[in-house]
C-alpha cells in the first residue's frame, strides 16, 4: 500500500443534498471504544476516564445517510454523516490515536429505487473510481452547521474496483500531510449499491487484511488508493508500504511510551500440516535493509514484528521468496501444490502504549539480536513468545542482574540439598546459580507464597519480578494466598557469548513448552521410560557430579525436563558428538568410567533414539525441532 502524500486524488461531489433532513439521526450508530489500559489510551478530560463502550447517533445529512444505503447509485451515489459535537468526540478525533472504521456490504441492485429522490443532474465524477470514502472537516460546513453544497471532499480513500464481499475501511484521524484538522464527520460515494453495516471509532491501525472475500483496509487521514489486486478473489500485493502510527500521531502524544506493532498474517484457508521428514514451508521478506525468513508451522497465522526493529518513519515490506514444497508434499491433508506466495493474507501495523511490565510479543529468533539500546529499561527486556504466549522470556543485561532476580529462586527450585529453602543473601554469596533459567507457574507461586508467609526479606529485583508475574497472570492471589496462574518464565543474559545465547534460549524455551504443554510432557515421559537405563544413569550422574549443575535428580519432573532439554538443545547431527565429548570429560571418566565407556561404545544411541522421538512430536505439532525453536530470524543486508 502506498500512502499518497503529495498529490492526493480530489474528487468533486455535487450530489443532491436533502437539506430538510439535516438533523435526523441515521439508521447507523457510531460505536465508541471501551477504555483499555494498554492498547487504547484516552487522552481526554478526567471526566471521561471512566467511559465505557457505548453508541452515539450519527447525524444523517442526506436521504441515503438516513437509511445507511446507496441502493440506486444512478440517482444518488453518496452518503454524508456528521459526528455529534461533544468533548468526548473532539478528544477522540483530535488525539490521532484513533480511526473511523466503516464496514460495508454489497447490495444487489434491483434497478428500482426505494425512494422518490430526484435524479441528480450533476452526477459525481470519480475518474473511474467505483468507491470513495473520506472525512469531513469543519470548513466543509457553513456557520449554521449545514454541509456546504459545493464543498470539495479532501484526502479520499478510493477504489477502482469494489470487492465482491464485505469491505471495511479504517481511516485514522491524523496524517503526515494533514495532521489533525477539526474532523466533524465523513462521506461515502459508490457506483455500486452498498450498505453501511456499522461504524465505530477504534484504535488506529494501518494496512490490509484479506479474509476470503472480505477485505479490511486501513490508512491515514492523508487519503489513499486501495490496490486493485486486493479487490480480486485471489491476488494480494507482494509489496506494502505503511507509515508508522507513531510517526503520524502528533508529537505531544508520541513520547508516551507508545510502540508500533507490525503483523504479517497468513491465510487460514491454507493450513500447514507437517509430517516427519517433510520439508517445512518457508517465506522470505525484505524490510528496508533487513531480510526476514519465516518458517510456516501448524496453527500459526501471524508473525509479529516490533516497530523498534525498523527505525524509519515508513515501514516497507516486500515478499522476496518462498520455498515451495516438493511435488509429493502438500501444505494440508486436503490441498495440492499450494501457491506459497499467496500464503500471506495481510500486513498491518498498529499502535499501543503498553506498561513496562507488559511483554513485547516476539519470536525467539528475533530476540537474540535485538538491539539493546531499544530496550525499555537498561537492566532487562521482557518478551512474550508469540507461539506460546504464556511463556515470558527475560533477556538480562548481565549475570549479576539475572542473579538479583533469579538466583535465590534457582536454589529453591532445582539445586540438590536446597530445594524448598529460602537462602539469605550471605548464604547465596559464594554459591553459583545458573547462567540461564526456567521456572513454571507452580514453582514461582510456591516461592513467593513461602516468602510472604515467612516474611522473608526479598530484594528489590525479586519484588519487581513478583509484580511482573501478577501483572501477566503467571501467579495469582486467592483467599489461600499466592497460587499458580498460567505460564512460565525463562531467561538468558547478554553476558553470554552469542553461540551460548543461542543454545541457552533453545534449552530454556524447550523447558517453557514442557511447562505449558501437557501433550509434550507425555511424549517426554514416554521417551524417557524407553531409553536404556544406563544412558539415563549417565545423564543423572552428569547432573550430580558437576558443581555448576547440581540438579535435584530425585525430582522426577525435573529429571525428565532436563533430560529432554539436554537432548534437544542441539540438532541431531551434533547430539552424538555432544554426549561422546561428555563421556571423555576427565571428571566423568574418573567417577563413572563404566558408564562413560558405554556411551562411547554405543555412540549415544539411546539418546539419539529418544531425541528423534521427541523431535518428531515437536516438528509435527509446532514446526520446531532439536536445535531450532524459532520460526523467524532476521539478518541485516
Image (cartoon, grey):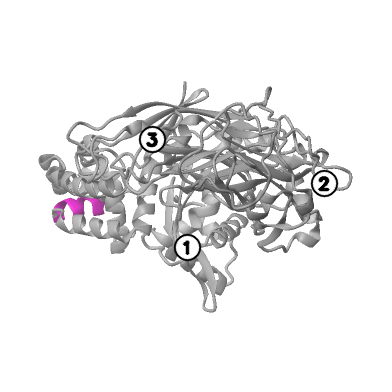
Q: Is residue 11 left or right of residue 168?
A: right
Q: CA distance from mark 3 to mark 1?
A: 49 Å
**Label 2 residue SS:** loop
For label 1, the residue is: 444
**Discs 3, 1 touching: Cβ within 8 Å:** no
Toward the left, the furthest residue is: 601
* Magenta-tinted stretch: 533-541
> For the point 61% across and 47% down, which residue is it?
101
Q: CA distance from mark 2 to mark 1?
A: 63 Å
Tell me the tag on residue 115. Answer: none
**Label 1 residue SS:** helix
Q: Is residue 321 magenta?
A: no
Q: Pointer 1: residues within 10 angstroms few (<14), some, or many (20+)?
A: many
> x and y percent of residue 39 in the render?
62, 51
Q: Main secondary structure of the magenta part?
A: helix
**Any part of residue 491 in sight:** yes
Tell me the tag on residue 146. Answer: 2
Quadrant of the image for the N terminus?
top right
Q: Pointer 3: residues within 10 angstroms few (<14), some, or many (20+)?
A: few
> For the point 74% across and 60% down, which residue is it?
49
For label 3, the residue is: 234
**Label 3 residue SS:** loop
Of 33 and 560, which appears nearest the observer? 33
Residue 540 position by quadrant = bottom left
Q: Is residue 536 magenta?
A: yes
Q: CA distance from mark 3 to mark 2?
A: 43 Å
Q: Is residue 469 left or right of residue 18?
A: left
Q: Is residue 623 left or right of residue 487?
A: left
Q: Earlier in the sequence, mark 3 or mark 1?
A: 3
> x and y percent of residue 529 in the render?
17, 59
Amino acid at each position: 500500500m502506498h500512502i499518497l502524500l503529495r498529490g492526493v486524488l480530489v474528487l468533486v461531489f455535487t450530489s443532491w443534498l436533502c437539506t430538510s433532513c439535516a438533523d435526523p439521526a441515521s439508521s447507523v450508530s457510531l460505536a465508541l471504544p471501551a477504555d483499555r489500559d494498554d492498547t487504547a489510551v484516552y487522552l481526554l478530560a478526567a471526566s471521561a476516564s471512566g467511559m465505557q463502550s457505548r453508541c452515539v447517533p450519527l447525524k444523517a445529512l442526506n436521504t441515503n445517510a438516513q437509511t445507511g444505503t446507496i441502493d440506486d447509485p444512478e440517482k444518488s451515489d453518496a452518503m454524508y454523516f456528521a459526528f455529534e459535537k461533544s468533548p468526548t468526540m473532539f478528544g477522540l478525533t483530535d488525539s490521532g490515536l484513533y480511526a473511523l472504521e466503516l464496514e460495508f456490504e454489497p447490495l444487489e441492485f434491483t434497478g428500482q429505487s426505494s425512494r422518490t429522490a430526484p435524479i441528480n443532474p450533476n452526477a459525481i465524477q470519480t475518474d473511474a473510481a467505483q468507491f470513495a470514502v473520506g472525512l469531513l472537516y469543519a470548513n466543509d460546513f457553513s456557520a449554521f452547521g449545514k454541509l456546504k453544497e459545493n464543498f470539495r471532499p479532501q484526502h479520499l480513500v478510493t477504489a477502482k474496483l469494489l470487492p465482491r464481499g464485505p469491505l471495511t475501511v479504517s481511516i485514522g484521524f491524523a496524517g503526515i500531510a494533514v495532521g489533525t484538522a477539526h474532523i466533524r464527520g465523513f462521506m461515502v460515494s459508490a457506483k455500486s449499491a452498498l450498505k453501511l453495516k456499522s461504524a465505530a471509532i477504534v484504535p488506529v491501525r494501518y494496512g490490509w487484511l484479506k479474509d476470503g472475500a472480505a477485505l479490511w483496509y486501513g490508512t491515514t487521514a492523508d487519503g489513499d488508493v486501495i490496490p486493485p489486486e486486493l479487490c480480486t478473489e485471489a491476488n494480494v500485493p507482494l509489496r506494502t508500504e505503511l507509515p508508522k502510527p507513531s510517526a503520524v500521531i502528533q508529537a505531544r502524544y508520541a513520547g508516551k511510551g507508545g510502540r508500533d506493532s507490525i503483523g504479517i498474517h497468513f491465510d487460514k484457508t491454507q493450513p500447514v500440516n507437517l509430517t516427519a521428514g517433510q520439508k517445512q514451508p518457508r517465506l522470505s521478506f525484505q524490510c528496508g535493509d533487513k531480510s526476514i525468513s519465516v518458517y510456516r508451522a501448524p496453527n500459526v497465522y501471524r508473525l509479529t514484528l516490533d516497530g523498534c526493529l525498523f527505525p524509519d518513519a515508513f515501514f516497507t515490506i516486500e515478499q522476496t521468496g518462498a520455498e515451495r514444497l516438493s511435488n509429493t508434499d502438500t501444505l494440508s491433508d486436503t490441498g495440492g501444490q499450494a501457491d506459497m506466495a499467496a500464503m500471506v493474507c495481510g500486513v498491518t501495523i498498529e499502535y499501543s502504549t503498553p506498561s513496562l511490565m507488559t511483554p513485547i510479543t516476539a519470536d525467539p529468533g528475533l530476540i537474540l539480536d535485538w538491539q539493546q539500546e531499544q530496550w525499555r529499561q537498561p537492566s532487562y527486556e521482557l518478551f512474550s513468545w508469540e507461539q506460546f504466549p504464556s511463556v515470558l522470556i527475560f533477556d538480562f543485561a548481565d549475570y549479576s542482574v539475572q542473579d538479583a532476580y533469579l538466583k535465590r529462586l534457582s536454589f529453591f527450585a532445582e539445586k540438590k540439598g536446597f530445594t524448598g529453602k529460602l537462602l539469605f543473601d550471605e548464604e547465596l554469596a559464594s554459591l553459583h546459580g545458573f547462567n540461564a533459567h526456567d521456572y513454571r507457574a507452580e514453582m514461582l507461586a510456591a516461592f513467593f507464597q513461602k516468602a510472604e508467609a515467612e516474611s522473608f526479606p526479598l530484594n528489590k529485583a525479586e519484588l519487581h519480578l513478583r509484580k511482573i508475574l501478577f501483572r501477566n497472570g503467571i501467579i495469582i492471589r486467592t483467599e489461600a494466598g499466592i497460587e499458580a496462574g498460567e505460564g512460565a518464565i525463562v531467561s538468558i543474559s547478554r553476558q553470554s557469548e552469542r553461540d551460548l545465547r543461542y543454545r541457552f534460549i533453545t534449552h530454556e524455551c524447550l523447558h517453557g513448552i514442557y511447562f505449558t504443554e501437557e501433550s509434550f510432557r507425555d511424549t517426554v515421559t514416554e521417551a524417557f521410560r524407553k531409553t536404556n537405563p544406563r544412558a539415563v544413569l549417565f545423564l543423572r550422574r552428569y547432573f550430580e557430579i558437576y558443581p555448576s549443575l547440581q540438579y535435584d535428580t530425585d525430582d522426577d519432573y525435573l529429571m525428565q525436563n532436563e533430560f529432554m532439554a539436554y537432548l534437544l538443545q542441539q540438532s541431531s547431527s551434533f547430539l552424538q558428538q555432544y554426549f561422546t565429548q561428555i563421556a571423555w570429560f576427565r571428571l566423568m571418566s574418573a567417577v563413572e568410567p563404566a558408564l562413560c565407556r558405554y556411551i562411547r561404545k554405543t555412540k549415544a544411541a539411546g539418546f539419539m533414539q529418544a531425541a528423534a522421538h521427541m523431535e518428531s512430536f515437536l516438528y509435527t505439532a509446532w514446526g520446531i525441532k532439536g536445535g531450532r525453536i524459532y520460526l523467524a530470524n532476521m539478518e541485516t543486508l
